[in-house]
Amino acid sequence: MKGSFLGLALALSALVPQVAMADEFPLAAFDRGIGVDPVAGLTSTGVPVLNVVRGVSPGAFPWRISGLRAEVRQDGRIRVEGRGLLLTGGNGLGTTAGQRVFATLFCGAPASATASSSNAAGVAIEPNGDFRIDDTLTPAPPSACDSPVLLIISAGNGHWFAAGIPQSDER
C-alpha cells in the first residue's frame, strides 16, 4: 500500500510542473517596434491614403520608437516596455506631446480580428519616450492568437503611434 501511494504521489508531482508550465509560454511576443507613418501611400491621383491598421487610424504626425518588447500571457496579462517613443514631425518634434498610451492586441485575419486592450486610461510616456504597461487585456484574448498585431495607441484620441514586430522563433 505504501509503495502504491508513493508511486501515485510521484506521478502527480510530475504533472504539476506541466500544468504550471502551460502559462509559461506566451500567447504572443514582440521584440521590436516601428513608429507610425500616418500616410501609407498615395492613390494614382496623388491623394494620400491613411495608414489605418485593424480599423485604428494613425496619429496625425509620424512617431518613432527606438525599442519595444512585449509579451502577452495565455491569461491575458500583458507587459510592454517601450523606449524612445517620440514625435518626428510638427512643432512637438522630439517630444511626447504629453501623451498617454495603452496597448491593443489583435488576433486573427484583418477583416475578422478580435481586439483586446489594456486599460484605455493609458500610462504616461516619460519625457525621453520610455513607457511601461503592466496590465491585463480585456476582453480576454482568444486561446490561440493567429496573425498577432500589437498597437500602441494614444489614450487621448485613440490613434496608433507604434506597432510591435512579432518575435521570431529564429533567434
Image (cartoon, rainbow, N blue to C red):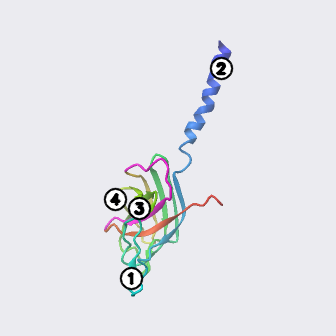
Q: Tags 3 and 1 in contact by the CB under 8 Å rule?
A: no
CA neighbours of label 4 inside 10 A, class few (<14), some (14 to 19), many (20+): some
Q: Give the residue pinned by disc 2.
A: 6
Point out which mark residue 48 bears: 1
Point out which mark residue 13 bears: none
Q: Give the residue pinned by disc 4.
A: 120
State which region is magenta.
139-156
Residue located at (49% from left, 47% from top): 74
Q: Tags 3 and 2 in contact by the CB under 8 Å rule?
A: no
Q: CA distance from mark 3 to mark 4?
A: 23 Å
| Mark 1 secondary-structure assignment | strand
| Mark 4 secondary-structure assignment | loop
Q: CA distance from mark 3 to mark 1?
A: 22 Å
Of the two numbered discs 1 and 2 on the same chain, state the one appearing first in sequence.
2
Most extreme residue toward the left, as rendered?
157
Q: Is residue 89 above or below residue 35?
A: below
Q: Report the side of 52 relative to 165 (left or right).
A: left
Please identify the quadrant where the N terminus is shown: top right
* Residue type beneath disc 3: Ala
Q: Position of residue 106 (x, y in %)?
A: 43, 58
* Residue type beneath disc 1: Pro
| Mark 3 secondary-structure assignment | helix
Of the two numbered discs 1 and 4 on the same chain, state the one appearing first in sequence.
1
Q: Nearer the viewer, mark 3 or mark 2?
A: 3
| Mark 2 secondary-structure assignment | helix
Give residue 117's quadrant in the image: bottom left
Of the two numbered discs 4 and 2 on the same chain, state the one appearing first in sequence.
2
